Amino acid sequence: MTERQIAILSSIIEQYAEVAAPVGSVTLAKLFNVSSATIRSEMAKLEELGLISQPHTSAGRIPTDKGYRFYVNLLTQQQEQLQAPDRSSRAIEARVATHGSRADRAIRSAVDSLVDLTSNLGLATIGDELYLSGMGNLFSQPEFMNGNHAQSVARLLDNLEPWLREAAPNEPLNVFIGSENPIGKSSGATLIISRFRSPFSDNSYIGVLGPTRQSYGRVMRLVRQTGAMLEETL
């Protein structure tokens, strides 16, 4: 892929996250200061690679799970470099610090903070319990108004805790996009979780579940930093 194709793919993903509607060539042509025909040609190449798709004739393009995976891999490489905490992560840290002597309350507070900041469903393992917060956020997303998608997401949530115990993903940040999810493969959901050590387990998890249409850079950074902060605090 060329640098411009990567930039166009990134722009489609980021704009789709904001507007929840297919991104057209006219919008991108203005952004890249090239003709609409040039953008359409580049879009055709991205579509051939399976990174974007056209939901219906005369529509713009939306990312595919493969496109999101390419984008997330790029972000992961960038975020592996040390990053200073931003205002949002400092806000989570301050909120958690008020419960520093109670690990369960600290973890719940961190989850609730992620819910507020990402508008996703937040989750964490606390011993043998899976704590969930922000269910209304999840099912108010336009993607999950469809009954089939909602059922698939519910199935994923019902089976998430035993799957985490069995699979024990061991990376500091784990991202499961759409069909990559072990359960609910057709849900159109993305699970972003961080593993951390806590008084309850060496394999505790905190993260969010939301549509594949995510602001991945921000959400991945917040989840990664929250997991690291909890491990240090607890």
Image: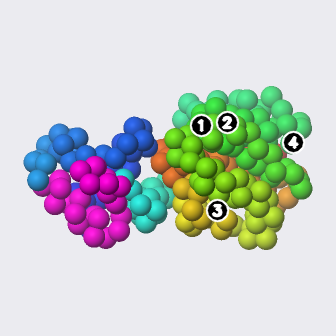
What's the mark number on residue 104? 4
Q: Nearer the viewer, mark 3 or mark 4?
A: 3
Tag 4 near tag 2, CB within 8 Å: no
Which region shows up in magenta? 38-61
Q: Quadrant of the C terminus?
A: top right
The kind of residue tagged 2 is Gly
Q: Is residue 152 magenta?
A: no
Determine which residue is flagged by label 3: 184
Measured in 3D between alpha carbons, the distance from the residue under mark 3 to the one under mark 2, in whole angstroms, is 19 Å
The kind of residue tagged 3 is Gly
Q: Please tell me whether mark 3 sits on a helix, a strand or a loop.
A: loop
| Spot occupied by residue 62 in the image (x, y as percentages of width and height) | 36, 53
The kind of residue tagged 4 is Asp
Give above or below for 44 relative to 193.
Answer: below
| Spot occupied by residue 96 in the image (x, y as percentages of width and height) | 76, 34
Tag 2 near tag 1, CB within 8 Å: yes
Measured in 3D between alpha carbons, the distance from the residue under mark 2 to the one under mark 1, in whole angstroms, is 6 Å
Q: Please tell me whether mark 1 sits on a helix, a strand or a loop.
A: loop
Measured in 3D between alpha carbons, the distance from the residue under mark 1 to the one under mark 4, in whole angstroms, is 28 Å
Lateral position of residue 204 relative to residue 181, left or right: right
Tag 3 near tag 4, CB within 8 Å: no
